[in-house]
Image (cartoon, rainbow, N blue to C red):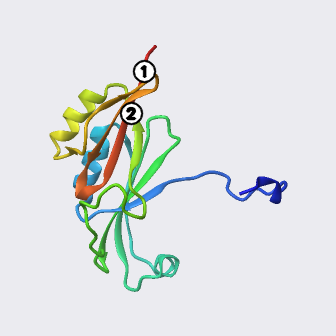
Amino acid sequence: MNESNYPGRVTVKRMDNVGIVFEDLDAAVEFFLELGLELEGRMTVESEWAERIVGLKDMKVDIAMVRTPDGHSKLELMSYHSPKAAASDPNAPMNTLGLRRLLFAVDDIDATVTRLRALGAELIGEIVQIPGVCLMGYLRGPEGVIIALAEENNG
């Protein structure tokens, strides 16, 4: 894509959040809080305007908003009462089409993995040193969500 085809064009100001649907919202919130995100708030949405936005009739959804400690990134965690969420394969491999993972920079990857394993997270492969860059590993968290963790090199 040639950016010169769009001189002076600005459309996106920022990305505010990424939304993820879970069956067990409480488990998802606990997982992301243990990872180090902060709970910004929770609410239930059940309204005609929301139904019109998402294109679902008789919608009722619980939402929890969590943010990174620096306040720059947010996740909107959702659980639908109605209509019930459509099932997907929580064990889909990394090369499956669609959103595959979220990456978080952490200060201690081993300690983070240990804490998240206590909540049922499973290491997908190995924690590997990317030469000169970071230690990195992938985990499956609640309901199969894939979380990448990166610990930057300190030298």
Outermost residue toward the bottom in this view: 57
**36 shown above or below 81:** above
In the rendered image, the vertical position of residue 135 relative to residue 122, given as above or below = above
Residue 80 coordinates in the image, percent (x, y): 31, 71
At which x and y percent is residue 6?
80, 59
Q: Is residue 94 left or right of residue 120?
A: right
Name the residue located 37 percent from the left edge and 84 percent from the top edge. Answer: 58
Q: Could you say which quadrant of the image residue 94 lies in?
A: bottom left
Name the residue tied to disc 2: 150
Residue nearest the viewer, comparing 53 with 110: 110
Most distant residue in the right direction? 7
Q: Residue at x 82, y 54 (%)?
A: 4
**Mark 1, residues whose alpha carbon is within 10 Å: few (<14), some, or many (≥20)?**
few
Q: Amino acid at mark 1?
A: Asn
- Amino acid type at circle 2 is Ala
Question: Which residue appears at 15% of the width and 40% of the height?
Answer: 118
The foreground one among 73 and 145 is 145
| Numbered tag placed on residue 153 in the rendering | 1
